[in-house]
Amino acid sequence: MQVNPQQLLDGGYIILRQVVPPAELDKLRTSYEVLVERQRAIWAGERKPDDPPGGVWEASPQPRLVAHKLIDRATANAVEFWLHENTLGVARQLMRAPEVAVTEMFMMCSPVRDHGPARWHRDTHPDHQAPLEGLQQDLLANGPAYVQWNIPLYDDSVLWVVPGSHRRPNTEEETSQLLEDPRKPLPGGIPVELKAGDGVVYINLILHWGSAYNAKLRRTIHGGHRSVGGPLFPYIFNGIWDLDRGFTEHLSPAARATFERCAQLQAKERDMIESIFRAMLDRDAAAVLTGLAALHPGETGRIVCIVLLSKLTTRLMTLKRPDVTGQPVPERARAISVHSAMLNFYEDIARRFTSSEVDTLWQRFATLDTRLQSPTEQTVPWSPSAPTRYAVYEMPVEFDVEDFIASWN
């Protein structure tokens, strides 16, 4: 399956027909339905006293399962499909990277009752990533480093997008409507009409919308791929599986080898991050610049990479707090606003540093963090639930890598 990377950069999404080869569709449906039943049993067992009998399955507007945690040898195709030429192969073409890894491997299911539409959103927030302007400029200068997928096993038109919105800030009209009512169609928004087995691959900075969470049968494979060693450091830089690879024993030798290779590359990347942080602790500017050049080879946008590392550091500080360290996994994940399956990544880096080192590391980022803040609290139009003290759109003016290093003094 051949794709045009420029089409993705221009529009923000590409609809692909028969991503699931027709001969494989029923097999995938069967495997995923087994996984759904396994997850339903888990959720029922985890229910709290005030929850409905089915727990999350009955309460959530979009029950979402993590495929790799549920497979066995008979259902391994649910995971191996993420390595297919129509998925991994397409991602390689779109990101033009030397290596590409799977990140998430979810399935989105229909709820048991009508919950109506979700909110329009972009999958980014200035509390956890760089301002939108920085992410977009990095993308346009260096190409995508992360692509997201929806691949329905039954016809699906739940997803809507605003074509081209991944390249620009919100318009005044969009912002006004999102603040007034984020659950109705936006100007220029269009439904992504997918037949069973089709797929849409998209840049998740695009304005997008889950238009109807109702009881109509929905079984949509959802997840992503990221580049490893490409021109830019991805703003979604961690997978949910690479520190928890027991599932690979159920896969074919070739698939197992692919996941192992990806895990090794991502481990090397975490080592790079550690080396940059240790160079910062040592005030070794030359080593920091060398590390940044390896982590974000594209010369344009390296300050965005530094911002992402600063946001990573805020999560490390939270994980080091005594009131967080002893909490169960869901509470620790909630404390840093990540999915429980993604917690391993952050804790792997956190355990490499003492609390004192993390505090000192944050001091190195303090000036940058101040420059990222807005004079007043801001509302994020695509995520309005809580105001933020960080600038939503604009990167700091006249503050680049050299200024960041100079700010240590």
Image (spheres, rainbow, N blue to C red):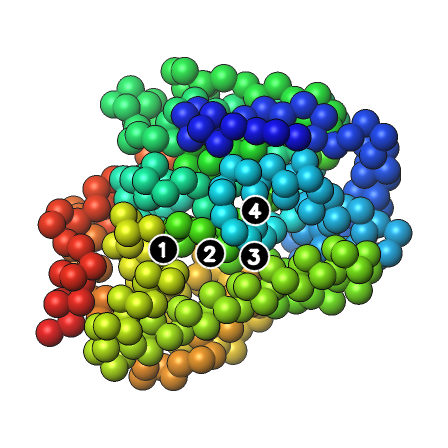
Which residue is painted at 55% across and 64% down in the image? 265
Q: Nearer the viewer, residue 242 or 325?
A: 242
Q: Which percent across, then down, holds residue 208?
A: 47, 29
Q: Which percent across, then down, holds residue 279?
A: 29, 77
Which residue is painted at 49% across and 43% down in the image? 96
**Callout 1 touching callout 2 (CB < 8 Å):** yes
The residue where tag 2 is placed is 229
Nearer the camera: disc 3 or disc 4 = 4
In terms of image quadrants, where is residue 158?
Answer: top right
For disc 1, the neighbor class at 10 Å (few under 14, some 14 to 19, many from 20) is some
Q: Which disc number belongs to residue 239?
A: 3
* Nearer-N-terminus badge (1/3): 3
Q: Which percent across, then down, holds residue 384?
A: 35, 39
The residue where tag 4 is placed is 225
Could you tell me which secondary element the residue under label 1 belongs to? loop
Could you tell me which secondary element the residue under label 4 belongs to? strand
For disc 2, the neighbor class at 10 Å (few under 14, some 14 to 19, many from 20) is many
In terms of image quadrants, where is residue 355?
Answer: bottom left
Distance of label 1 from label 3 (alpha carbons): 21 Å
For disc 3, the neighbor class at 10 Å (few under 14, some 14 to 19, many from 20) is many
Which residue is painted at 13% across and 67% down in the image? 407
Q: Nearer the viewer, residue 342 or 15?
A: 15
Distance of label 3 from label 4 (alpha carbons): 9 Å
Amino acid on which disc 1 is placed: Pro
Q: Which disc number belongs to residue 158?
A: none
